[in-house]
Image (tube, rainbow, N blue to C red):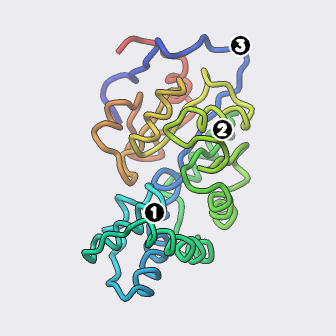
Amino acid sequence: MNAQPPRIHSATFDPIPRDATPLVVFDLDGTLVDTAPDLTGALNYCLAEAGLPSLDVDAVRPHAGRGARAILQLGFSAAGITADETCLTNQLPRFLDRYNAHIADASMPFSGAVDALERLRGAGFKLAICTNKMEALARRLLVELQIAGYFSAICGSDTFAGRKPDPVHLLGTVSLAGGSAPVSIMVGDTDTDMEAARRAGLRSVLVDFGYDPCPAAHEKADLVVSRFSEIDASTLLRLIETVSAD
């Protein structure tokens, strides 16, 4: 956890409404759930169909939150092949069908994630999902893992006209969850998540154990944590209530 106090970009925030229920919006892949094993399985299925060598999950994990096209491009690139638009168009349905059928074979919440959801819900927080995964896949994954019931809204890349870092995605999620932006926090693992929070005027928490906690993400985050035990009601309420200059 950062030794320094949370850094709040106060100029972007409206006053906190009285009696507003705090909301925590979570990214999904690489934040709440380690989905890399099943994404790797779908990729390797496509690679095998194309007569190409498979990839190890450790090679895929840093790219697992970037979407199916990026994962396919990674697999073909590793075999020395540039996947053009025709190739991706042909492979994408195969990848998605395979992934949908095996979405929770090996994927599981990160250590402490479900306990954190329980703590926050018990403390009166609302919870939501804002992911660049397609909404139907996100819902299916959460249902399979038996944690869908924690969330007041589950919003994917196709739920709104834009996707993270477009603020319409995050602000739309806040609205559907019945939240208010001044008392909402984005928790994610990438610069895309932190930039979405910045553009939408939300406080942000970066989990540095995720797929792509790059230097830019660290710089934009209001708080950085290394385990879910660091995400509790008192910490997040202080983050909401603290308005200080950088």
Which element type, helix, strand or loop, lies under badge 2? helix
- Residue farthest to the front, as pictured: 86
Q: Which residue: 37% across, 30% down?
A: 220
Q: Position of residue 239 (x, y in %)?
A: 50, 24
Q: Position of residue 138 (x, y in %)?
A: 62, 58
The circle drawn on residue 173 is 2
Q: Nearer the viewer, residue 229 or 154?
A: 154
Marks 1/2 in contact by CB < 8 Å: the verdict is no
Which residue sits at x=54%, y=27%? 200
| Vertical placement of residue 68 versus 157, above or below | below
Which quadrant of the rendered structure holds the N terminus?
top left
Is 110 left, or right, of 141 in this rendering?
A: left
x then y, percent, for residue 180: 67, 25
Q: Earlier in the sequence, mark 1 or mark 2?
A: 1
For the point 42% across and 47% down, which residue is it? 227
The residue under label 1 is 69
Give the CA distance from mark 1 to mark 3: 44 Å
Q: Which mark is residue 18?
A: 3
